[in-house]
Image (spheres, grey):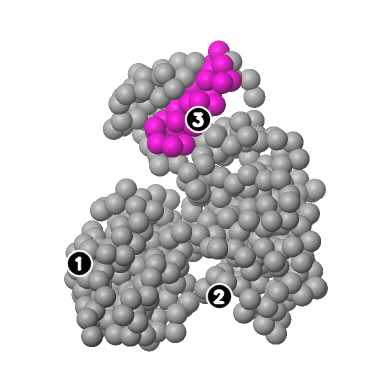
Amino acid sequence: MILAGKKVVVVGMALSGEAAVKLLLAKGARVTAVDSAKSGEVCGVAIQAQTDSAFMNADLAVVSPGVPADADILRRARERGTQIVGDVELASWFLEGDLIGITGSNGKTTTTALIGHILQEAGIPCQVGGNIGGTAPAAMVETSRPGQWNVMELSSFQLETTETLHPHIGIALNVTDNHLDRHYTLANYAAAKGKLFVNQAPGDFAILNADNIHTVGFARLTRAVKLWFSGTKSVPEGAWIKDGQIVLDGEPLLATSEIPLKGRHNYENVMAAAIATHLAGASLPAIAAAVKSFPGVEHRLELVRTLNGVAYYNDSKATSVDATMKAIEAFPGLLWIILGGKDKNSDYTVLREPLRGKAHAALLIGASAPKIAAQLDGSVPLIDAGTLDVAVQRAANQAQPGDIVLLAPACASFDQFHSYEHRGQVFKKLVSDLEERSS
């Protein structure tokens, strides 16, 4: 893709936008940076207001994931002939080495990090980025090399603006209700996820969850070799669980009891990662050893501390109802669960039965608290905490030895926090500041 001399507008000056500006300047483009709230400059480029005039005569606009692809200002730019792509599409034009792309409603951060960990432990060159760990897709271009794997977590926001993205290995972990405030319908959301597979060729690989109706449907979108994983049945090619063992291509890999990650959903993440890394050249013994040594991901069922016999877990990354369901399933019961934040047009009623069986109470915070309270009324005691600090203190005051305080909000963080990472860090600080009870 030749961009020298082209006028390119980069929309949104967060991490991904800044990386896109830097890459485009390196490719000789004439860059305009716009943002609806930020001012100043990026890489010597002044940040302009997000107005129609900034897009005039633009050949290309690169949209950050946080900017809705159907925004009116982008629609008008398209009508004037400007090509609109996202930061992942831009990066894919210049990345060297093959791409492993991971998407899904839940588990993609853990699976992406696990794939990177296995490849590194097996001595296979790779780099990890995308929607994970502060490494934007465009920032991966400079450090990409032939023969190196680019392991990239990909959100629906990133995938919906792709056109030619071509992963050699594509992984779909699951699709459940999420981000309906942005995509409007589950069908639209699933279609965005499915774009990961549409440009694959017969020599590529699609790794799909055999237990999820939407990921099964992605098999129709791709010309790649289909490999499957399942927690409930054997599959023709791929990974499954038999007698407490994960089996990969008919060979035992490791016992589920040896996986350090909590929750049955993490068995699926391990199976998907094992298939991908085996395709990338890792041996079964190397994969098993790396899974056992994997430290997990911050803000994903992360044990913060045990105090006065009460365990405190940070699952701030549980920004959807389905992710919270999986968090609840990972524990036997005795939960004080903190729910709430910015609603994503979610249905919280599906939490009624799981909470009825496992929770002492739900402590509600943030803008979505009234909606959650209405939908959970009568299923479990509800405590209107309002803010995270109040929720942590009230849970600590009431929890008894053996209980678990779990932050698994089922919501986005943007009503009270900058990000789910910020929310998780605040929770960890609050828990760390709790004092030992005097006996």
Query: What is the CA distance from the residue labelled 1 to the residue labelled 2?
Result: 31 Å
Res. 280 visible in picture: yes
> Please, which residue is most extreme toward the top here?
5
Residue depicted at x 56% and y 21%? 26
The CA distance from mark 2 to mark 3 is 38 Å
Residue at left offset 32%, top offset 48%: 418
Work out whether 320 lies above or below 280.
Answer: below
Residue 60 shows up from this direction? no
- Magenta-drawn segment: 5-29
Pick the residue in front: 381 or 157. Answer: 381
The residue identified by callout 3 is 20
Say which amino acid is labelled 3: Ala
Q: Earlier in the sequence, mark 1 or mark 2?
A: 2
Q: Is residue 187 above or below residue 94?
A: below
Residue 9 highlighted magenta (yes or no): yes
Which label belongs to residue 272? Answer: none
User: In the image, which is nearer the foreground, mark 1 or mark 2?
Assistant: 1
| Gap between marks 3 and 1 measured at Cα | 40 Å
**Depth check: 55 or 135 in front?**
135
Residue 420 in picture, x, y percent from top left? 37, 55
Q: Could you say where residue 227 lies in the image, as x and y percent from the top left?
A: 73, 62
The quadrant in which residue 164 appears is top right
Please, is residue 155 above or below residue 34 in the view?
Answer: below
Q: Is residue 223 left or right of residue 341?
A: right
* Other-residue count near label 2 (Cα within 10 Å), few / some / many at <14 / 14–19 / ≥20: some
User: What x and y, as percent, mark residue 376?
Assistant: 28, 76
Q: Quadrant of residue 148?
A: top right
Mark 2 / mark 3, whichever is N-terminal: 3
Is 223 placed above or below 376 here? above
Amino acid of disc 1? Val
Q: Which mark is residue 390?
A: 1
Residue that badge 2 annotates: 264
